[in-house]
Image (cartoon, rainbow, N blue to C red):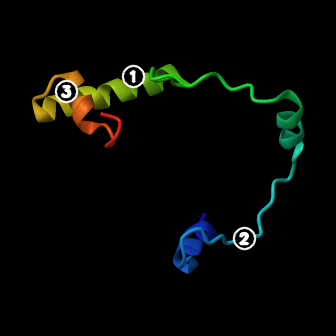
């Protein structure tokens, strides 16, 4: 991770690439991806969480933001959305 962060200091031009010495030990994932194609689910506006605890934590954060700003949950999500997605 340190090498990656240091690379940001060396990059001076947009689009410049810094090659690091790290490689995947096992590149079987590349062959699988090429042979089986893209098996990811279609994108959706509905949040998906790997674990139930992640969903609960996200909902608590949204509720806390709503309480702090005095906005309803829908309004709080709207005002927190990245520009261009509102």
Crowding around mark 1 (Cα neighbors within 10 Å: few <14, some 14 to 19, many 20+) is few
Tell me the residue that label 2 is attached to.
19
Tag 2–tag 3 contact (CB < 8 Å):
no
- Earlier along the polypeptide chain: callout 2 or callout 3? 2
Camera-side residue: 47 or 45? 45
Relative height, residue 65 to residue 2 (above, below): above
Q: Which residue is drawn at 68% across and 26% down?
A: 40
**Mark number for residue 13?**
none
Mark 3 residue element: helix
| Measured Cα–Cα span from mark 2 to mark 3 | 44 Å
Left or right for 70, reference 62: left
Q: Residue at x 54, y 76 (%)?
A: 13
Tell me the residue that label 3 is attached to.
75
Instruction: Give the image location of residue 26, x and y in percent.
Output: 87, 48
Q: Which residue is drawn at 85% across and 53% down?
A: 25
Q: Is any atom of residue 64 visible in this view?
A: no
- Earlier along the polypeptide chain: callout 1 or callout 3? 1
Tell me the residue that label 1 is attached to.
56
| Measured Cα–Cα span from mark 1 to mark 3 | 19 Å
Camera-side residue: 18 or 69? 18
| Measured Cα–Cα span from mark 2 to mark 1 | 39 Å
Mark 1 residue element: helix
Mark 2 residue element: loop
Q: Is any atom of residue 49 visible in this view?
A: yes
Relative height, residue 23 to residue 44 (above, below): below
Callout in the foreground (2, 1): 2
């Amino acid at each position: 991770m340190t090498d990656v962060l240091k690379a940001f200091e060396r990059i001076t031009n947009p689009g410049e690439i810094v090659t690091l010495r790290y490689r995947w030990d096992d590149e079987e994932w590349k062959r699988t991806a090429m042979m089986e194609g893209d098996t990811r689910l279609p994108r959706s506006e509905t949040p998906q969480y790997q674990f139930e605890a992640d969903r609960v934590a996200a909902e608590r954060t949204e509720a806390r933001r709503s309480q702090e700003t005095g906005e309803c949950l829908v309004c709080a999500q709207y005002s927190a959305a990245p520009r261009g997605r509102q």
